[in-house]
Image (cartoon, rainbow, N blue to C red):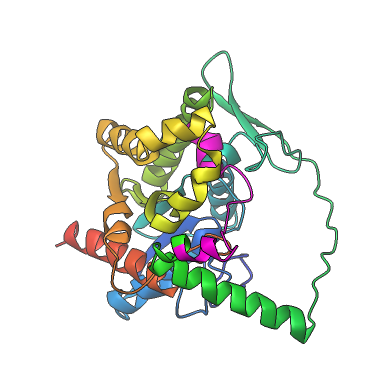
Amino acid sequence: TEINSLGTRNHPLTLKPAKNRISIFGDSFTFAAALNEDEKFTSVVQKLSGDQTEIVNISVPGYGTGQQLLFLNELNNRGYDPGRKIVLVFFTNDILDNVGLDYRSANRKSQQPAFFIEKDGSLNYTKPVDPNNSKVSISLSSKSLFARFLKQRAELIAAKYPSVLNIASAFGYTPNLPRVPGLVNGWYYRGWEDRWAITEHILLEFQKVTKNLTGNDLTIAFIPSPIQVEPVFKKMLKSFDQNAPVQDFRSNPNRPQDVLRSFCETHGIEFIDMTPSLVSNDKSGPAYFLREGHLNVVGSNIVGRGIFNSLKSNTD
């Protein structure tokens, strides 16, 4: 993984673009740590765009929309020119990141800024506490690696053929989600409207800054949660079906993108919803890593092509 002097996952960049530049902001889905350099979806967009366009991946794992806005302002202060276009990649967990809440428990994370709206309607945030950089111990024994490999292969087969879960359960193997997903914690628990209101303020500020810097409007690309896309995840969620917010998700699984689409239509923001393309992917296997939920090579290629086609159609 190549990190340049600006702290982005790119080759070294000049502050001023030498050619047509498009800056793509995002979190771990855009950073794509599990993928090779040429496999991440920004690289797919670059390959399809050709040599006359420079696609810049500006992403930090764990950053929500608010932190991405702060990063954009920081880069601007350092003289970075985002080019003619900014694409903001939005993931369902952003609604929790923006108020500094943990995906698992929805408790406050002190190492992350929490944005809020002042009484006068202005946007503000609490400064984070320096995170405790504790080391993580990982076992590298051949036995554990082999066991993990076998389990991963089994889960990939289950993702491609969900009916296999019914057979596997008869032999005592039933994969379960370890917790209620961040998607549910963010968008279906009580108070989600208040969390969205803060994210809405952040997006409006992002739109304003984008217009000032590029002269063009913001584009938002939505990547759905694997819970919304992969049938196997929906089966694995059954252990939480007595949970009222999970029931709410079942009845209205596309709330995040529907709310975001309505917001974009209201404010004249181009909206790219990758849900239909990812859902219709039924020939190439799962689009997400089943073990940790990020886009795999298949999903990354779908998203890259989708973003490229949308940008191209709006410039032709």
Image height of 153 relative to 286, above or below: below
Furthest-top residue in view?
Answer: 119
Residue 304, how many percent across, how many down?
Answer: 35, 67
Query: In terms of depth relative to the viewer, which is nearer, 138 or 90?
Result: 138
**Which image quarter is the C terminus in?**
bottom left
Going by the image, does 206 lie left or right of 120?
left
**Residue 149 placement: quadrant:** bottom right
Q: Position of residue 207 (x, y in %)?
A: 39, 40
Residue 300 picture quarter: bottom left
Left or right? Give the position of 161 relative to 31: left
Q: Is residue 271 left or right of residue 89?
A: left
Residue 43 point in image, percent of width and height: 41, 74
Residue 112 appears in the rendering: yes
Which residue corresponds to the image point at 50% horizontal and 55% vertical from the top-left? 26
Image height of 208 relative to 171, above or below: above
Magenta highlight on residue 190: no
Q: Residue at x 40, y 49 (%)?
A: 228
Instruction: Pick the residue in front: 180 or 166.
Output: 166
Using the image as rendered, state which of residue 96 and residue 131 is in the foreground. Answer: 96
**The N terminus is located in which quarter?**
bottom right
- Looking at the image, the residue that sits furthest to the bottom is 142
Q: Residue 176 in magenta?
A: yes
Identify which residue, 162 or 80, lies in the foreground. 162
Residue 45 lies, in percent from the top left, at: 34, 71
Q: Residue furthest left?
A: 316
Q: Which residues are magenta?
A: 167-188
